[in-house]
Image: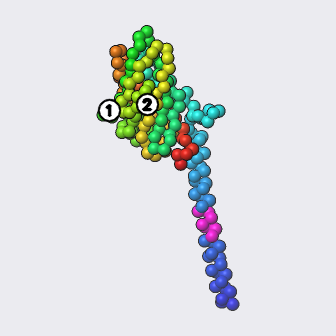
């Protein structure tokens, strides 16, 4: 009789442990699911092609006659890659140089992280922490800005890119992007 009572108690403890373990996994799963849903609900809405809506992003050009369009922004591995189109709308043709030197180009996220190192450009035929490209009149030129971030992020609150005109004087020495949503490449995780 005592042996049956002991066996029941051991069996009850085992059942509680199994249920507790399953509950722990269920809680972990629900927590991850909740974070994913929260990210989707509170991040900028996606468009029909799966890209993030960049219409809320403010782009401030270094000059009124230089049009800059944000095409998209995607994180792939440790890098956030911002795709831009730059169009010279002035009467003059000139070159534009982008520079990451000495932390003059910088990016920020909502958590207060600052990204200065590891910013590179692919602009025209050049690639590196300094890139220069000739801008013919009314011709879009692609520019890719890569920012080393190391961890997944959903938003860049501000991106400042130091730039200068070659054979032209720009109104400002920087291009700014504010509130840039970051899409994630599925292979990142």
**Label 1: which secondary element:** helix
Query: In the image, which residues are magenta?
Result: 18-24
Residue 66 shown in magenta: no
Task: Tell me, for residue 56, which label it has, or none.
Answer: none
In the displayed structure, 144 sits above or below 3; it is above
Q: Position of residue 19 (x, y in %)?
A: 64, 68
Residue shown at 39% from the left, 36% from the top: 119
Task: State the separation of the CA atoms marked 2 and 1.
Answer: 15 Å
**Label 2: which secondary element:** strand
Quadrant in the picture for the N terminus:
bottom right
87 sits left or right of 105 in the view: right
Near mark 1 (Cα within 10 A), the count class, few <14, some 14-19 or many ≥20, is some
In the displayed structure, 49 sits above or below 69; it is below
Near mark 2 (Cα within 10 A), the count class, few <14, some 14-19 or many ≥20, is many
Q: Position of residue 5 (x, y in %)?
A: 66, 85
Q: Position of residue 101 (x, y in %)?
A: 32, 32
Q: What is the quadrant of residue 25 in the picture?
A: bottom right
Hey, which residue is sitting farthest top in the picture?
Answer: 91
Task: Return the residue nearer the eye: 99 or 45.
Answer: 99
Can you identify the residue that label 2 sits on? 122
Can you identify the residue that label 1 sits on? 101
14 sits left or right of 157 in the view: right
Task: Return the residue nearer the eye: 73 or 4.
Answer: 73
Residue shown at 57% from the left, 34% from the top: 52
> Closer to the observer: label 2 or label 1?
2
Q: What is the quadrant of residue 18 in the picture?
A: bottom right
Residue 19 shown in magenta: yes
Hey, which residue is sitting farthest front in the picture?
Answer: 125
Please tell me which of labels 2 and 1 falls first in the chain: 1
Residue 176 visible in this rendered orientation of the protein: no
């Amino acid at each position: 009789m005592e042996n049956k009572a002991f066996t029941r108690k051991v069996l009850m403890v085992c059942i509680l442990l199994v249920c507790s373990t399953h509950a722990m996994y269920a809680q972990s799963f629900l927590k991850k699911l909740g974070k994913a849903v929260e990210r989707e609900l509170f991040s900028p809405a996606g468009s029909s092609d799966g890209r993030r809506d960049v219409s809320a992003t403010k782009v401030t050009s270094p000059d009124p006659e230089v049009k800059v369009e944000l095409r998209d922004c995607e994180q792939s591995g440790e890098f956030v890659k911002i795709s831009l189109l730059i169009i010279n709308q002035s009467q003059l043709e000139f070159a534009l140089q982008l520079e990451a030197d000495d932390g003059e180009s910088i990016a920020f996220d909502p958590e207060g992280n600052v990204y200065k190192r590891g910013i590179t450009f692919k602009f025209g035929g050049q690639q590196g922490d300094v890139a220069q490209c000739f801008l013919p009149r009314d011709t879009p030129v692609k520019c890719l800005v890569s920012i080393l971030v190391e961890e997944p992020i959903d938003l860049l609150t501000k991106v400042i890119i130091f730039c200068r005109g070659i054979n032209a004087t720009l109104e400002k020495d920087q291009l700014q992007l504010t509130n840039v949503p970051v899409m994630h490449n599925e292979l990142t995780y």
